Image (cartoon, helix red, strand yellow):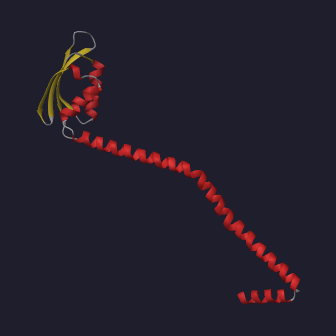
Amino acid sequence: MANDWNERLRGYLAARNPRERATLAVGGVVLLLLLGYGLVYEPLSQARTKLAERLPRLRAELRLMRVQAAEIERLHTRAGDLARSSLEQRIKSSAAAYGLVGNITRFTPVTSEQVQLATQPLPNSGWIDWLTDLERQGISVERCRISAGGQPGLSSLELTLKGGQR
């Protein structure tokens, strides 16, 4: 098949005079150059331009991902430290987050998994939210005695809290 085409092309060119053969050869070279430009160079040039436009954005995304990875690592380390912290530390940390540390009048670790504490009169919504947070942390109320405070909406607590190492 290739030989047939080759023979036909040679026969076609042999029938032409030298000037026509030169014109056909130059036309063939120009056609090859145009095809090379259109099919190879131009697509590569466009891809390079698009990449040059995207590169700053991709670099910014990479910097952001590195910062986020460092933050994730820091949070994992912090979460690991909190998970290994004692029950006493977790209760005190939670109480501090709710502004209740100054209201705790007695704090007695009974065992590594049990703590007894007593509070001054606290607003009901404050201690309810605090106990809800402790429950989310896996700390349960084993015993609770609620006494009415001197004013409406205030209560004193005597608690026994239980929770293992996280």
The number of discs equals 0
Residue at the spot 26% in from the left edge and 32% down from the top edge: 135
Residue at the spot 75% in from the left edge and 87% down from the top edge: 6
Q: In which quadrant is the C terminus drawn?
A: top left
Residue 107 vertical placement versus 122 (above, below) = below
Residue 97 vertical placement versus 65 (above, below) = above
Q: Nearer the viewer, residue 1 or 11?
A: 11
- Horizontally, residue 13 falls left or right of residue 121, namely right
Most extreme residue toward the top is 151
Q: Nearer the viewer, residue 141 or 105?
A: 105
Q: Is residue 1 visible?
A: no
Query: At which x and y percent is residue 74?
Result: 33, 43
Query: At which x and y percent is residue 140?
Result: 21, 32
Q: Nearer the viewer, residue 149 or 52?
A: 52
- Image-quadrant location for residue 78: top left
Residue at the spot 26% in from the left edge and 29% down from the top edge: 94
- Horizontally, residue 77 falls left or right of residue 156, namely right
Q: Is residue 52 visible?
A: yes
Query: At which x and y percent is residue 60?
Result: 51, 47
Residue at the spot 34% in from the left edge and 46% down from the top edge: 73
Residue 140 vertical placement versus 157 (above, below) = below
- Image-quadrant location for residue 75: top left
Q: In which quadrant is the N terminus drawn?
A: bottom right
Q: Nearer the viewer, residue 143 or 118?
A: 118
Query: At which x and y percent is residue 149?
Result: 22, 12
